[in-house]
Amino acid sequence: MPLLLPLLLAAADPQLAMNPLPVGSVVPFGAPPSAAAQVFETELGPVETFDPMGRAVDLARDLPRVWSGVYRSFSGGVPLPVQLVLMEATPMGQMVDLRGEMQVGDTTVAVQGNLNAKSDQLDLLMLCDCEVGGMESGGEISGVQGLELAGWVAPRLTNPGGRFDLRPVVPPAGSPSGGAPVRGLW
């Protein structure tokens, strides 16, 4: 404890540190200049208020369960129709665990993957030892904007991969859906 006072005095004002104060005296306090506060703020950067775990819970609840679109191979060929059905979306920290089925052309395969709630990165694997629409086993579906901007990354350099163009399927107007709950007026 006796070393604490000299350190505090040295931090407050170097002149006070060189001249010891008598017992019972008070060290004068001066507020730091506003420029010092601005330098402190710019060095540390802004405070992050984003809650990725909360967003993961929201995504798991609100993520559309049916996606439809096409797969186009970078090596050419006919675009194949794709339908992705997410049966489960479970929040795990800032990640959302996804499980479901994907139909590419006439073939249906199980899929499993993760969606990062902070960065919207998607990693989705086809759970089969098969080749579906030119996509061979060992590759992965990778997205940088969730499911909307995704591509298939091949496991070998000899296959260029491909691109998915998926959009959420919106139920037709007037059809029953698991939409917003009915709320009473009060």
Image (cartoon, rainbow, N blue to C red):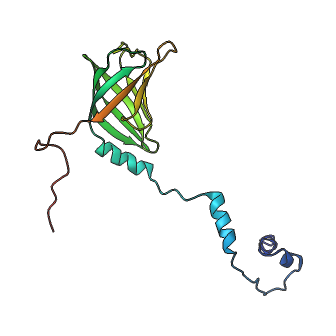
144 or 49, which is in the foreground?
144
> Relative to 175, is 108 above or below?
above
Q: Is residue 103 visible?
A: no
> Relative to 180, is 86 above or below?
above
The residue positioned 36% from the left and 35% from the top of the image is 148
| Quarter of the N terminus within the rendering | bottom right
Residue 9: quadrant of the picture: bottom right
> Relative to 25, is 181 above or below?
above
Percent across and percent down for residue 39 are 67, 64
Q: How many marks?
A: 0
95 or 71, which is in the foreground?
71
Percent across and percent down for residue 115 are 40, 37
Percent across and percent down for residue 116 are 44, 40
Q: Is residue 45 visible?
A: yes
The residue positioned 29% from the left and 45% from the top of the image is 62
Residue extending farthest right? 18
| Quarter of the C terminus within the rendering | bottom left
The residue positioned 62% from the left and 63% from the top of the image is 41
The residue positioned 46% from the left and 45% from the top of the image is 118
Q: Is residue 139 left or right of residue 19?
A: left
Residue 130: quadrant of the picture: top left
Percent across and percent down for residue 75 are 42, 15
70 or 135, which is in the foreground?
70
